[in-house]
Image (cartoon, grey):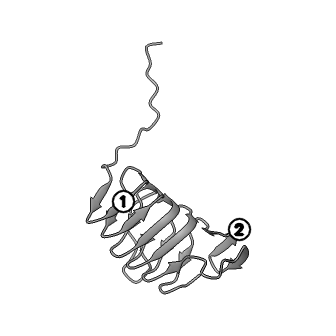
Amino acid sequence: AGRPVYTRPRFLPPVKVTDCRIFESLLSDGAILTGSEISRSVIGIRSLVRNGSVLDRVVLMGNKSYDTSPEDVVPLGIGFDCEIRNAIIDTDVRIGDGCRLINTEGVHEADGEGWFIRDGIIVVPRLQTIAPGTVI
C-alpha cells in the first residue's frame, strides 16, 4: 500500500515542435518535429520528422533511441520533403528524403522491398530503410 506504481519511468524531454502545423494528432515524449504538417496521426516516442514532410492518417511508432548513425546512411525517422498517407511505420524505421508513401494507385494488397500494403494501408516493418525518392 505504501509503494507507488509508476507507469512511465522514462526521463525524456517533451516533444519539440518547430514551425509545424499539427491537426488532431497525438505527440509522444522526445519527438522532434521540424517544418512539417501532421494531421490525424499518432507520433511515437523519439520520432523525428524533418522539414517539408506531410503526414496524414499515420501511426509513426518512433525509435528506441536517438540516431547515432554515420552520415552516409539514411537517418532514423522521416526525411526531408516526404509525403506519407494512410500508413503504419514501425519502430526504428529510416525513410529517405523525398519519399511518397501514399498508395497512388489505390492498391489493396502488395509487397515491396521493406514495405507492404494490406487493406490499402501502407506498412513499413521494424528496422526497415526506404530509399530516398521512393514512390509507393
- Left or right of residue 75: residue 90: right
Q: Could you tell me how far apart the alpha carbons at marks 2 and 1 are, in whole angstroms?
A: 27 Å
Which residue bears the numbered disc 1? 22
Residue 76 in sight from this viewpoint: no
Q: Residue furthest top?
A: 1
The image quarter containing residue 109 is bottom right
The image quarter containing residue 3 is top left
User: Which mark is drawn over residue 5?
Assistant: none
* Label 2 SS: strand
Residue 104 on image: x %, y %: 60, 81
Counting residues from the N terminus, which is met first, the one under dot 2 or under dot 1? 1
Residue 21 on image: x %, y %: 33, 63
Residue at image coords 44%, 83%: 98
Q: How many residues crowd mark 1 within 10 Å: few (<14), some (14–19), many (20+)?
A: some
Above or below: residue 135 compared with residue 3: below
Which residue bears the numbered disc 2? 118
Query: Mark 1: which amino acid?
Result: Ile
Give the foreground label among 2 and 1: 1
Question: Total number of numbered labels?
Answer: 2
Residue 23 in sight from this viewpoint: yes
Residue at image coords 29%, 59%: 17
Residue at image coords 42%, 61%: 47
* Label 1 SS: strand
Residue 114 on image: x %, y %: 62, 76
Q: Residue furthest right?
A: 109
- Left or right of residue 19: residue 70: right
The image quarter containing residue 112 is bottom right
Q: 21 and 68: which one is in front?
A: 21
Residue at image coords 52%, 62%: 57
Query: Mark 2: which amino acid?
Result: Arg
Above or below: residue 64 compared with residue 112: above
Q: How many residues crowd mark 2 within 10 Å: few (<14), some (14–19), many (20+)?
A: few
